[in-house]
Image (cartoon, rainbow, N blue to C red):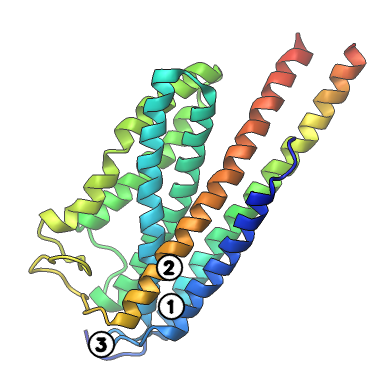
Amino acid sequence: MENVNTDGYMVAGYIVAFATMGIYLLSMYLRSRNLKRDLETYESMDREKK
Amino acid sequence: MQSKPIALTILDILSAIGVIVATYFALVFAPTEAVMGNVQRVFYFHVGTAWVGLIGFVVAAVTGIIYLVTKDMRWDRVEVAAVEVSTMFFFITICLGSIWARPAWNTWWTWDPRLTTAAVTELIYIAYFMLRAGMEDPEKRARFGAVYALLGGLSAPITFMVIRLFRTIHPVVIGNASAAAQGGFDMTPNMLTAMFIALGAFTVLFIDLMWHRIRMGNLEEKVEQLKLKVSM
């Protein structure tokens, strides 16, 4: 491999790594939030049923 | 939902600190590799994410066995968490490898044994979620998932060992590389330090994310049970 400037590849690599982890964290947050909402809805439906 | 344990909050903080420290060691502390230049710095995250990715697939296989023996749904939730978190980390591994390969091998991708087994492993675990999504019955889903995770788990040691057993252009940094390997380099002590810090940081982050995902699985289970109760 000849001596070339590879800084751009390094930056791209770290952007991909952090973006992937960020998207995953966001997806976990959104899924948890939706589940909590569902739980509240079903709990209130259950209370009304009683 | 149960309140968040203090230990999990501490683990969240440790994970964040660990990733920041690992990034500092990879980008600042480790020396620039003489031939490849700065792109070699992706190696630290590449190895760190590959480590937790492959370990997670083995964890999923083991928890799959435990589920099949005990039929306890808690082990199914651990298995799902391990597969999901590992699939995400292993995706990063493959992307970083491809980005490194472009300047090192002059190509984004080549069907080398290591790259092929890594891609197959990732696809196996993407298919795992497709398999589970196609099943309504929780017990059937858990049983099929466990068997699949057990068989899929074989791909982890194969992916790890392939560069040590076959002629491949993928470098082996620790151990003996194939004669055809391209892009290898000798690790200096500072490079080794950065690598071990990345391994440690990603291990802590992996445990932290697993814990969060297991808690989410518990919540999913609760919602599913309540939904059934209400609909009856």
Q: Chain of mark 1?
A: B
Query: Which residue in the protein does label 2 denote?
Result: B198
Q: Is residue B95 visible?
A: no
- Mark 3–mark 2 Cα distance, whole angstroms, equals 22 Å
Query: Which residue in the protein does label 1 denote?
Result: B26
Outermost residue, top side: B232
At label 1, the amino acid type is Ala
Q: Quadrant of the N terminus of chain B?
A: top right
B203 w.r.t. B61: above or below: below
Give me the residue at 71% from left, 45% from top.
B4
Q: Nearer the viewer, mark 3 or mark 2?
A: 2
| Mark 3 in CB contact with mark 2 (< 8 angstroms) | no
* Residue B103 in picture, x, y percent from top left: 30, 78
* Residue B173 in picture, x, y percent from top left: 22, 69
B46 w.r.t. B186: above or below: above
Q: Chain of mark 2?
A: B
Choose top left, top right, bottom left or bottom right for residue A22: bottom right
Q: Chain of mark 3?
A: B
Give me the residue at 33% from left, 72% from top.
B100
At label 2, the amino acid type is Ala
At label 3, the amino acid type is Val
Q: Are marks 1 and 3 on the same chain?
A: yes
| Mark 2 in CB contact with mark 1 (< 8 angstroms) | yes
The mark found on residue B35 in the picture is: 3
